[in-house]
Image: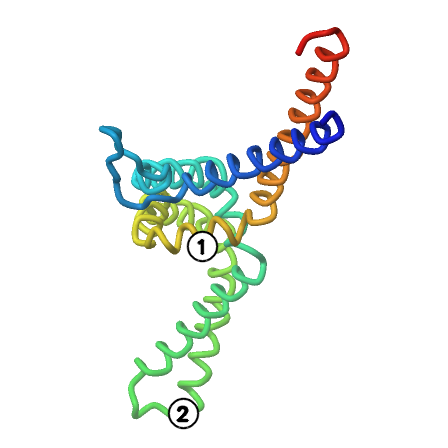
Amino acid sequence: MRAVAWLLFPLIGAVIGWSTNVVAIRLLFRPRRPVRILGLTLQGLLPRRHGELAEIVGQVVERELLRRDDLVRSALTPAVREQVSSTVVRAAGEAAFQRLPAFLPAGLRLAVAAAVRSAAAAESSRFTEEHLPALAADFIDGLDIAGMIRNRILSLDLAQLEALAYAVARRELRHIEWLGAVLGALVGLAQAALVAGLRAAGFH
């Protein structure tokens, strides 16, 4: 009987610890709709706090992860500045060529367009350095990043959110389940040791 206790107690503890953690994790997502049991309303944490979670995630992402200065710095790379400058120069040259009277010689129109492009190149370079960061910052300030993230989360079906959570943290959730089994087994070993100690002391 003593040998059975050393095997049975840890086994029962491991099963209880594992199943308890499995149920606790499932209760994060299920049931998706409120269920009344013995006068108590049972609903998964994520379904019950869907709106609140979406609001908090949106605020945290906007405040901590997508800061304005970081967005401006990431958006205004040298390649982007060059693209903006070249687009302005090309548009200025095309507009000048098209707006000149058609009766003018094509060579003259091309020369004027080239002069306009040259002037636009110098001006656009100065503009992108002096004014583009402020314009980009104003544009980003006008974005409701928190609201967009909140609405996106709210638009996701609860099944999609559950699948997303498992896709991101499946390994960690498995670790939590098995940690419950390990802790339960340790508790079972402690119980077996306690029983053995009591019997050795003469308690039955």
Left or right of 39: which side holds 174?
right
Looking at the rendered image, the quarter that the C terminus falls into is top right
Who is closer to the viewer here, 127 or 185? 185
Identify the residue position indicated by label 2 in the image: 106
Q: CA distance from mark 2 to mark 1?
A: 64 Å
How packed is label 2: few (under 14 Cα within 10 Å), some, or many (20 or more)? few
- In the rendered view, would you say 175 is above or below 89? above
- Mark identifier at residue 40: none
Q: Which amino acid does the dot numbered 2 rest on?
A: Ala
- In the rendered view, would you say 105 is above or below 140? below
Identify the residue position indicated by label 1 in the image: 163
Identify the residue at image location x=55%, y=34%: 16
| Circle 2 SS class | helix
Who is closer to the viewer here, 115 or 95? 95
Total of numbered circles in the picture?
2
Residue 104: percent from left, percent from top: 34, 90
| Circle 1 SS class | helix
Who is closer to the viewer here, 197 or 23? 197
Residue 94: percent from left, percent from top: 39, 79
Residue 163: percent from left, percent from top: 45, 54
Q: Are marks 2 and 1 in contact (CB under 8 Å)?
A: no
- In the rendered view, would you say 87 is above or below 193? below
Answer with the quarter of the image where residue 99 lies. bottom left
